[in-house]
Amino acid sequence: MEIELVRRWIEEAVLGLGLCPFAGEPWHAGRVRLTVTEATSEQQLLDDLCLEVTTLDETDPELLETTLLIIPKLLRSFEDYNQFLDLADELFDTHGWTGRFQLASFHPDYQFAGTKPGDPENLTNRSPYPLLHVLRESTVSRALEEHTNPDQIPETNIATLRALSDERRKAIFNYLPTN
C-alpha cells in the first residue's frame, strides 16, 4: 500500500506537474528503488538508511540511480522528522558518504520557513509519508549542469502549484492530512 501511494505521488505530482525535471529518465528506466522501512525507532531507521545507502553505493548507477526510503511508522511530526535529518547527516559523515550522496527530504506536513501551512509552495516537498530520498551527488551535479536554468526550478514549481485550481490541487494531493 505504501509503495503504491508513493508511486502515484511520483507519477501525478513529481512527474505529472514537472516538479523535478531530472526525475523522469531514471523513473521510466526503472532505476528508482522504493523501499518501506518497518522502523519504529530512530536507531532502526538509521540502520535501514545505512543499508539503503550501502546498496546504492554498491550498485552500478546504470542499474540503480536513486532510492526513496518510505517511513510509515515513525517521524509523523514534521518537527521530529526535521530533527532526524541531523542524525542522518551525522550518519553520512561517519561513513564518508557526504559529498558522494545527499538526502532530499519529503514529509506530509513539510513546511518551508516563512510560509503558512496551507501555502502552495509547501506542496513541492509534501509526500504521502515521511521519505528520505537518497541521491548520488554525481547525478545531481550532472543534471544541474545540463539544465538551462536550475536556479529557476523552485520558482517555476511554486508558480505551477499556485496556478492549480483548489480542486486540481486536492485531486493530486488528496493523501495529505491538510486537504
Image (cartoon, grey):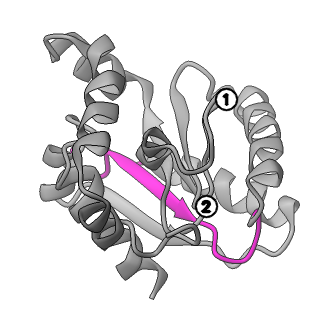
Q: Considering depth in this image, is 144 or 100 the residue closer to the camera?
A: 144
User: Is 61 or 6 nearer to us in this picture?
Assistant: 6
- Looking at the image, which residue sits at the far front? 166
Q: Can residue 110 be seen in this view?
A: yes
Give the extent of the magenta segment.
59-75
The answer to which image quadrant residue 140 occupies is top left
Residue 19 in view in this figure: no
Residue 60: x %, y % from top left: 31, 44
Residue 12, quarter of the rendered image: bottom left
Q: What residue lies at 81% left-to-right and 66% top-to-bottom?
A: 44
- Image quadrant for the N terminus? bottom left
Does the magenta portion include 22?
A: no
Tell me, yes or no, whether the two marked residues, 2 and 1, touch with CB atoms within 8 Å. Answer: no
The residue beneath circle 2 is: 130
Q: In the drawing, does residue 52 fall left or right of residue 31?
A: right
Mark 2: amino acid: Pro
Q: How far across and how far down the image is residue 14, in percent?
A: 28, 51
Q: Is residue 68 left or right of residue 178?
A: left
Say what secondary structure mark 2 lies in. Answer: loop
Q: Is residue 5 left or right of 74 when viewed as pictured?
A: left
Point out the residue furthest to the bottom here: 1
Tell me the kind of residue under disc 1: Ala
Residue beneath label 1, please?
113
